């Protein structure tokens, strides 16, 4: 993953990131972007029933 990111590649693929690559999302997109992604996920899935813990690594949520 480090090599792919250093060559301006991505840690995600056609079907998403996968559990093994969650740790690389912050390196690729930055903490601020992940915070916004978490806020969107919380808005669209407030009860966390869709893929709990599999779409984004834990972390802070953007609150505006």
Image (cartoon, helix red, strand yellow):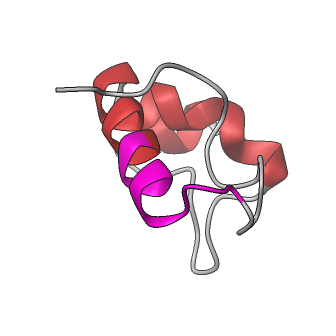
On the image, the x and y values in percent for residue 63 come to: 27, 26
Q: Is residue 54 left or right of residue 17?
A: right
Q: In which quarter of the image is residue 18?
A: bottom right
On the image, the x and y values in percent for residue 7 come to: 40, 42
22 or 5, nearer to the observer: 22
26 or 48, nearer to the observer: 48
Q: In which quarter of the image is residue 3?
A: top right
Number of numbered discs: 0
Residue at image location 65% in from the left, 55% down from the top? 55
Residue at image location 74% in from the left, 65% down from the top? 49
Q: In which quarter of the image is the C terminus?
A: top left
Q: Quadrant of residue 1?
A: top right
> Does residue 7 show up?
no
18 or 13, nearer to the observer: 18
Residue at image location 60% in from the left, 33% down from the top? 24
First to last magenta residue range: 39-48
Q: In this view, does 28 lie to the left or right of 1?
A: left
| Membership of 42 in magenta stretch | yes
- Tell me if residue 59 comes above or below residue 10 in the rendering: above
- Tell me if residue 61 comes above or below residue 38 in the rendering: above
Magenta: main secondary structure equals: helix
Q: Is residue 19 left or right of residue 55?
A: right
| Membership of 7 in magenta stretch | no
């Amino acid at each position: 993953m480090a090599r792919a990111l250093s060559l301006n590649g991505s840690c995600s693929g056609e079907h998403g990131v996968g559990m093994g690559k969650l740790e690389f999302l912050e390196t690729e997109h930055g903490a601020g972007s992940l915070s916004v992604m978490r806020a969107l996920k919380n808005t669209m899935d407030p009860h966390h029933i869709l893929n709990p813990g599999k779409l984004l690594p834990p972390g802070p949520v953007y609150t505006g």
